[in-house]
Image: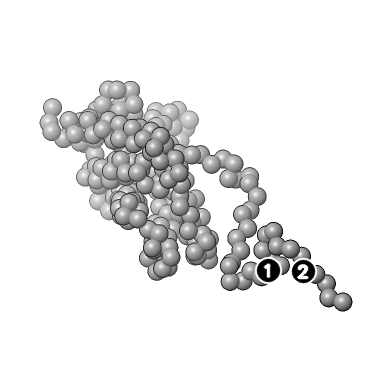
Amino acid sequence: MGAGEIFWDIVPYVTLAIVVVGTWWRYRYDKFGWTTRSSQLYENRLLRIASPMFHFGILVVIVGHVIGLIIPQSWTDALGLSQHAYHLQAITLGTIAGVSTLVGIALLIYRRRTNGPVFTATTTNDKIMYVVLVAAIVAGLATTLIGSGVVGEEHNYRQTVSPWFRSIWILQPRGDLMMQAPLSFQVHALIAMALFALWPFTRLVHAFSAPIGYLFRPYVVYRSREAATADQLVGSQPRRRGW
């Protein structure tokens, strides 16, 4: 067994340990920090465009990864979905979702960098998280193009990367399968594991909260301090009439 196989056998479990222990520690000792630290009060116009692009895009990306990594090729073959049809829809949806996610995160970073109050509220952890997150998205798009045969030779990751991923969860790691995948897939997986290792210690931890109620809650009304008058302030006394 080579060093590469040992690496892909061990590092995923190290990453999982960091995620589990780090999340427990964050929830146990930093409950008040378990938040996105929303900056909507500082700037809302660009946020209303960038945030949905990023979040809806990343949601489709996650669903695509779950289908591609967890569902074996034999299952889709049994349903009558050919490899060509699966490959075509994966490339189409993956590219659209990946570009949407990348544009969304680029606008969010631009907003954070150019808006004074938002930039002031940006921590070092945020900056590191943004770098790794963008790297993961770019690597994912590159892998989609390379694996699809648009650049280089086409590679069926459902015969290498997917079985390796599933082998981790049944405690029978197959690092040899990951070693058979092209370098672009290995780089993408490595960056993804680095992102998950950082996850519990950044604002990304809010994703574990599963805010289902957010979909049904009423709108939160924000009022500008400068535009508000005495009559608009909550709790203010009604103005007395004149004569």
Residue drawn at the location 50% of the way across and 65% of the way down: 43
Tell me if 207 is positioned left or right of 155 in this view: right
The percent position of residue 225, horizontal first and vertical second, equals 58, 67
Question: Label 1 is placed on what type of residue?
Answer: Ala
**How many labels were placed on the picture?**
2
Which element is circle 1 on? loop
Residue drawn at the location 51% of the way across and 39% of the way down: 210
Q: CA distance from mark 2 to mark 1?
A: 9 Å
Task: Give the residue at mark 2.
Answer: 239
Q: Mark 2 touching mark 1, by CB under 8 A?
A: yes
Task: Give the residue at mark 1.
Answer: 230
Quadrant the N terminus occupies = top left
Quadrant in which residue 77 is drawn? top left
Of 137 and 27, the residue lying toward us:
27
Figure colour scheme:
one colour
Q: Which mark is residue 148?
A: none
Residue drawn at the location 83% of the way across and 75% of the way down: 242
